[in-house]
Image (cartoon, rainbow, N blue to C red):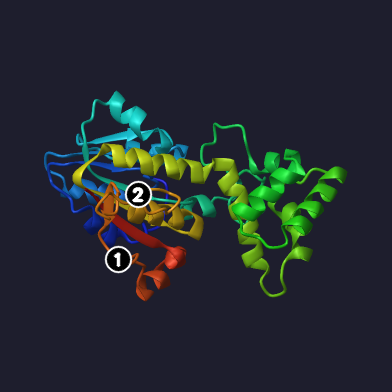
Amino acid sequence: MQEYHQPVLLPESIEGLNINPDGIYIDLTMGGGGHSKAILKKLVNGHLYAFDQDKDAKVNATEIENRSFNFVAANFKHLSRFLKLYKTGPVDGILADLGVSSYQFDKPDRGFSIRHEAKLDMRMDQQQHLTAAIVINEYETVQLKRIFSQYGEIRNTNRLTDAIVSSRSNKPIETVEELKEVITPLAPKYKEFKYYAQVFQALRIEVNDELTAIVDMLEQSNEWLKPGGRLVCIAYHSLEDRLIKNFMQKGNIEGKEEKDFYGNLLRPMEPVNRKPIVPSAAEIERNNRARSAKLRIAKKL
């Protein structure tokens, strides 16, 4: 088993699924298998399908010996495609623990972390072509400005982009340290690490097309959940959480209210909790990655 950290908000997410021992459940982000194993413990005649595009997660899946379990080596945006392939009917619960795992951050060769010297990679699916190095060195100026503004929510986007374009014209920017060297003069004083994190977040989202995948996942989850079924999502930054919140509360990712003739809100599901569930101080102390997590739960109407 690959060494993954303790999954975030584990008891809360399992409770949020409100598991029926004979139900069908989906873990859209298996990773180290922590959530999947907790779900399987509660199943009797039910079944679990676990998705993950990371090759290391596939290794972990081979070590789960359970007849009630199937692993799908694919991005969760392909949810419908594979559930049709398995001839699965409506499901009782879907869980998505979004973002990058602690294990992926801690593997230097993956290039996700600002702490390790590595090639600028950042691919969750290592079979795909696009890497962070390609984005940095080959994207047009207007494309770089878009991703740093939208995905990193960076204020000095123009200066940042100009610095990258100027540097790469002399020599390709290929490693984490080379990129940090270019962007450090642009970082606000005493907030350098936050700035690095924003830049890396923007690149990671672009490389993995993360927000599009989340939108696809939300819409497909709604199609597959049976009435009363639960959707449980853990997000780690505002861009992810905003999409989930809008979909659960308003029925669409834009957050627009649509009402029927009588003024009733038209939405396919409703939130179980008014506010997101966040980790306790004790959990954050055990696992610093949990500090930004927000758990939202919705029930299919």
Q: Secondary structure at mark 1?
A: loop
Query: Between disc 2 and disc 1, whose residue precedes?
Result: 2
Report the Cα–Cα distance between label 2 and label 1. Answer: 15 Å
**Image quadrant for the N terminus?**
top left
- Give the crowd class for mark 1: few <14, some 14-19, many >=20 residues within 10 Å: few
Which image quadrant for residue 295? Answer: bottom left
Taking the spot 72% from the left edge, 74% from the top edge, the residue there is 189
Taking the spot 56% from the left edge, 32% from the top edge, the residue there is 128
Q: In the image, residue 204 lies at what x, y percent?
A: 58, 48
Q: Is residue 115 visible?
A: no
Reading the image, the residue beneath label 2 is: 251
Q: Are marks 2 and 1 in contact (CB under 8 Å)?
A: no
Reading the image, the residue beneath label 1 is: 274
Nearer to me, 248 or 50? 248
Q: Is residue 25 shown left or right of residue 106?
A: left
Nearer to me, 177 or 292? 292
Q: Is residue 227 visible?
A: yes
Q: Is residue 141 shown left or right of residue 115?
A: right
Taking the spot 36% from the left edge, 35% from the top edge, the residue there is 79
Q: In the image, residue 231 lies at what x, y percent?
A: 29, 49
